Image (cartoon, rainbow, N blue to C red):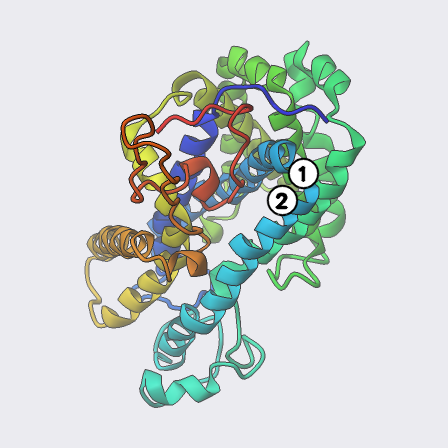
Amino acid sequence: MPPLSSPRRHDVDNLRSLAVLMLVPFHTARLFDATPWHMKDANAPFGAASVLLRTIEFWQMPLLFLLAGTAAAYALAARGPLAFLQERVARLLLPLAFGILILVPPQVWAERVTPAAPLRQSAPVFEGGFVEFLPHALVCCYPAANFSWHHLWFLPYLFVYAVLLALVSRAGDGAGLARWAAARPWRLALPIAPLAALEIALRPAFPGSHDLVKDWANHAHYGLLVILGWWFGRNLTLSAAIARHLALFAGLAALAATLWFAAMPVARGGLGAVEVAPQARLALRTAAEWLVLLALLGAGRRWLARPIRPLAAFAPLSMAFYMLHQTIIVLLGWALFGWQDAPLLKGLAIAGAAVVMSLAGAALVARSASLRPLFGMGLPRRAPAARSVARVPLIPTSQFEPPFAASILVAGRPRKEAIRHDR
């Protein structure tokens, strides 16, 4: 498979950074919405939180998995399957182990010591401080016991899909199919059919567990999105076609999302305006998801395909930000549980504090050579040995790996001749 010769994909970097930042309002809304979670606010359920949650959830994780496939296309072309998988072990499985041992236990403890929280996801109660809880933290398995990976489920799923991509990438890049799909806008919407069929066939039996082993509906859905993202990354003609038809896809996305919200029950954050069969609602959601993804990809290609300073600065921190943010939100929910008035103001305060604290923690991690590998960020790039001080200037050791490699989807360091690195 020939190496990719496209310029650096700033649109991929920027879309990914925005999706990671949206994790804060999403998980803050989980404190207040009408479905069980690790920590629930005393004001729950709060209707506005359910609406916000549904607005974000149907496209956010699908976008991250789609972009993971796109980023992997570059890494595989530059490094080869074996080196790609070796790096996935360091960038995904090591942070997963660290997070399970260090970042998840505070979340479980906060849930255990707050039995008054409504809609608490797991029933067991613990009386005692966090240090007293630590001997019980590895008792398997949540929700009946304490051992869990909580929000870090994304990491083992990405690793499994990386193995899948390493196999798929040997079969070719699907260039002929890409040219056929790019020729007509309706063909770019065809993935709705297999995605909807998988949802209708599997979702009723496998509603979503994030346990890796028995999560077949999510595996089928997210795995296909990763492959589609890889296909998009290998064939830039698809991105160009999506950008050309942005207005069409944005209009269809708005229509499909409106119909899905209209068919969703009020208790789940929808309008409850019409009653439809569960299969039809799944199909509507899948159509809305894919059309929104196309609209976001087109918007990214048109308006985000350039360096944007705040997002470029955030990209190297995004992995650590992702690992830290939910622990901070859960602990803030526990610490402020007694604040039982003004849920909107409380939610905004928690979200704002979570952003500041997660960014500060990620920045500290980025400056620590010992912590960086534990957060999937790799080691700082060392200055090359200078042959001559006059002829070869030193590269400051504070320059870390480029955002494309160091972000949450850890695409790996692309080959320099294949992708231009803009600092």
Task: Give the crowd class for mark 1: few <14, some 14-19, many >=20 residues within 10 Å.
Answer: some
Residue 200 screen position, x and y as percent: 72, 45
In the visual, does 176 lie left or right of 341? Answer: right
* Residue at 54 percent of width and 36 percent of height: 67
Label of residue 80 in the image: 1
Closest to the observer, 290 or 182: 182
The answer to whether residue 234 is above or below residue 352 is above
Q: Is residue 157 visible?
A: yes
At label 1, which amino acid type do we have? Gly
Q: Most extreme residue toward the right, as rendered?
A: 171
Label of residue 84 in the image: 2
Residue 330 screen position, x and y as percent: 34, 65
* Residue at 47 percent of width and 20 percent of height: 301
Rendering quarter of residue 373: bottom left
In the visual, does 261 lie left or right of 231? Answer: left
Closest to the observer, 119 or 104: 104
